[in-house]
Image (cartoon, helix red, strand yellow):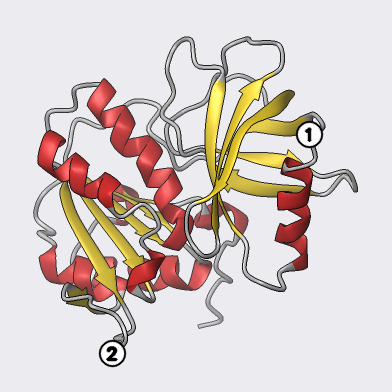
């Protein structure tokens, strides 16, 4: 991968696609193609100079000069509201990329298990689309976990992947809500993955979510017999676990 660099973009499109998720499309101002791997992220540079990290939801391609991001903005979340305001301002947007070691520089010649919580789906979207480009000939499984069913902010997309590309899609809702009509799986995400897992195969697993979610998943996978070297997440770099005092 090339050295990380600062790139300028303009906002081609910004829309609210759910109660608290914005879909953002950025295009390079110099029209030059971008270089990144499926699963990597960028850091948006705000006017105050502090970066905010977002997974690139687009798959890389040779002549690609545009990117897709999924930005979650809860009411009252001042920092992310600053991001949305900046993206809506009409000024040039600056970002550094690529970042992240949890990616598909090349598709492993193995089955892939992609595990996302919330907007971690963006990272997995890039990977799924890349496996299609690369004609990956092993099974691809996608687990997407949310607290409530409305958290599936692009609900039809993974269903389309399943129907058209054969992706094995498992949507999981962790908190039952009598007010919605969700009839699918209710479980903690790690439980849904482990219940379906065949630890004897050689699958590589990619995890995207909070540090708590990732380490809970990691512990469960190791107990289930998965080789730790086959488990990948950027959390291991930016939020390393404290060494045991035992």
Image x and y of residue 27, in percent: 62, 23
Q: Are marks 1 and 2 in contact (CB under 8 Å)?
A: no
Asked whether 182 or 45 is in front, the reply is 182
Left or right, residue 228 beside residue 198: right
Quadrant of the image occupied by residue 148: bottom left
| CA separation in Å, label 1 and label 2 | 42 Å
Secondary structure beneath dot 2 equals: loop
Near mark 2 (Cα within 10 A), the count class, few <14, some 14-19 or many ≥20, is few
Image x and y of residue 57, in percent: 46, 39
Marking on residue 218: none
Image x and y of residue 13, in percent: 59, 34
Q: Which residue of the protein is positioned furthest toward the bottom in this rendering?
A: 178
Marking on residue 90: 1
- Give the residue displayed 43% in from the left and 70% down from the top: 213
- Give the residue displayed 34% in from the left and 25% down from the top: 106
The N terminus appears in which quarter of the rendering? top right
Tag 2 residue: 178
Compared to 130, does 170 lie above or below? below
């Amino acid at each position: 991968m090339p050295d990380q660099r600062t790139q300028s973009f303009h906002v081609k499109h910004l829309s609210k696609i759910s109660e608290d998720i914005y879909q953002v499309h950025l295009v390079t101002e110099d029209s030059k193609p971008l270089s990144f791997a499926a699963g990597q992220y960028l850091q948006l540079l705000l006017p105050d100079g502090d970066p905010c990290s977002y997974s690139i939801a687009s798959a890389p391609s040779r002549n690609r000069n545009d990117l897709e991001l999924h930005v979650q903005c809860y009411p009252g979340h001042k920092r992310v509201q600053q991001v949305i305001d900046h993206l809506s301002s009409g000024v040039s947007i600056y970002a550094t990329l690529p970042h992240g070691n949890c990616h598909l520089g090349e598709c492993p010649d193995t089955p892939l298990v992609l595990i996302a919580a919330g907007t971690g789906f963006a990272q997995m979207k890039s990977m799924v689309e890349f496996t299609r480009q690369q004609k990956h000939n092993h099974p691809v499984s996608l687990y997407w976990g949310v607290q409530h069913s409305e958290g599936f902010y692009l609900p039809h997309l993974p269903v389309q992947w399943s129907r058209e590309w054969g992706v094995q899609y498992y949507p999981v809702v962790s908190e039952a809500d009598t007010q919605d009509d969700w009839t699918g799986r209710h479980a903690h995400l790690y439980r849904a993955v482990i219940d379906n897992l065949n630890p004897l195969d050689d699958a590589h697993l990619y995890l995207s979510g909070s540090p708590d979610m990732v380490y809970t998943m990691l512990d469960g996978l190791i107990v289930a017999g998965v080789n730790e070297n086959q488990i990948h997440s950027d959390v291991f770099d930016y939020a390393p676990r404290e060494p045991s005092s035992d």
